Image (cartoon, rainbow, N blue to C red):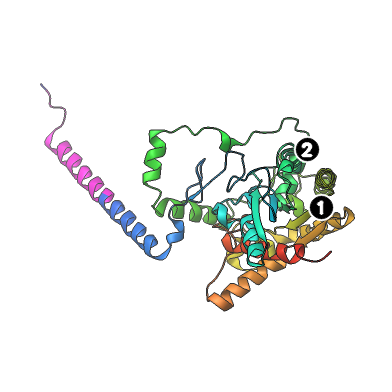
Amino acid sequence: MIPIFNDKALSHLKTGFRYTSVTLVKLLLAAILLESLLQVTAREYTNNIFDREFTGGHPIAVSSAGNRGPLLPIKKAPGELRILGMGDSTTFGTGIGAEDTWPAQLTEVFKKNGAKSTYINASLEGYSLKEINYVYRNQWSKYKPDLVVLAVDNNLVSMTWFRRNDKAMPANPYLEPIRKSKLGDVKNQFKILATPSWLKINSQKGLYLLGLANNNIKAEAPLGATLALGWKQADVPPDLPERAWKQFETDLKVLRDSVAADDGRSLAVVYLPARFMAFNGFSDNEQQVPKDRLTIDAGKRLGEISQSLGLLYVDSTEGVRRGRSRIAEEEGRFAPMYIKFDTVHLDRDGHKAVAEDLFGLLRKPD
C-alpha cells in the first residue's frame, strides 16, 4: 500500500498547522488588546446596537400607542401643557434614548419654568410629510396637544418628494411583536464589545477618505441629506431640488391646515441642520461632502416657506453652534452634537440645543 503522506509531506503539514495556530493566537491577542484599549479610551463604541429593540444601544421604548416615550391618556389633566413633536428619525431620536430627544427635553425646559408639561414624540424613521399628516389627523389630534412642533431635516424633504405618490400609509413596525431568536440572544451577549462598532465606523470613514465612497444620489431614488441643499450632479435633473421643495411646501400647507382645524391650533417648525453645514471641522465632514456642489440654503428656504404659510419658525443651526461653544466653555469638553459618523442625527447635546431654541420661540407672547 502506498502511503497517502510521506514524512516530508507530514512535516510540511505540521509546519503549516503551527504557523496557522501562531497567527490565530496573534490575531486573538491583538483583538483582545484592541478591545481592552477601546474599553478604556473609547467607551462610546460599546453597546452600539441598532435593531428592533435598541437604537445606539438605547431601548426603543415605543408605547402601545406608537409614540416613543411614555404612554399618555387621551384626556389631559387640568393645567397640563401637552407638547406634540413630529418628524422623522431625527426627532424619533436615532442613536439616543427616548428621554434625550428634543420633545422630552423641551418638556423639561417648560417644567423648569413652571409649566406642568408632558410630551408625545409622534415621529418615526423614514416618515414623509404625507405620513406625518396622516398620523396627526387619525391619531394624535385626539390627544389635544397645546404645542404642535414639526422638526424638519434635509432627509424629510427628500423623503417627502420620493414618496409623494404613495397611497398606502405604512404601519409602525415597533408595534409588531418581536420574534426572538437564538442569534439575537447571542448578539445581545456581545453588545458590550466596542471592537465591532469601531471597525465598522472607521472602515466607513476610510472609504470616504480614500474616495471609494461618495455622496452621489441616485437619480431614480434621490434620497439623503443633499437633495434639499441643491446638490449638483450630472445625471440628476437640475430642477429636481426645486421640485422637491415645491412638493414639501404643498404638503406642509396640508399639515398646517390639519393642525389649524383642531381648535385653531398653530404649527411651529424647527430646522435641524446637517452636521457638515453647521460646522467646518474635519471631524464634522467625515463623509467628505463637497460643499461647492450645494446651491440651496435649506434653513433659509424652509424659513421662507414657513413665513409664507404663517408658521412659527426657528432655524436651530445657530443654536447647535452655541450649544457646542457653551459646552466647551462651561464643561471643558468637545461636544460633537451628532451621533458617531452621522451627518444628520443629533446626539443628546444637539437635541438639548434644539429644545432651548424652541423654548425661546414658543414662550414669546405672540
Question: What x and y, as percent, mark residue 86?
Answer: 70, 48
User: To which quarter of the image does residue 180 belong?
Assistant: top left
- The three-letter amino acid code for the residue at tag 1 is Ser
Q: Where does the N terminus fall, quadrant-wise?
A: top left
Secondary structure of the residue carrying numbered label 2: loop
Visible in this render: residue 344? Answer: no
149 or 283, nearer to the observer:
149
Tell me which residue sits at (50%, 54%) in the image: 201
The magenta-colored residue range is 2-24
Left or right, residue 252 beside residue 127:
right
Which residue bears the numbered disc 2?
164
Question: What x and y, as percent, mark residue 204?
Answer: 53, 52
In the displayed image of the protein, which residue is found farthest to the top?
1
Disc on res. 266: 1
Left or right, residue 277 beside residue 333:
right
In the displayed image of the protein, which residue is found farthest to the right?
308
Tell me which residue sits at (19%, 39%) in the image: 13
From mark 1 to mark 2, how far is it between C-alphas? 24 Å
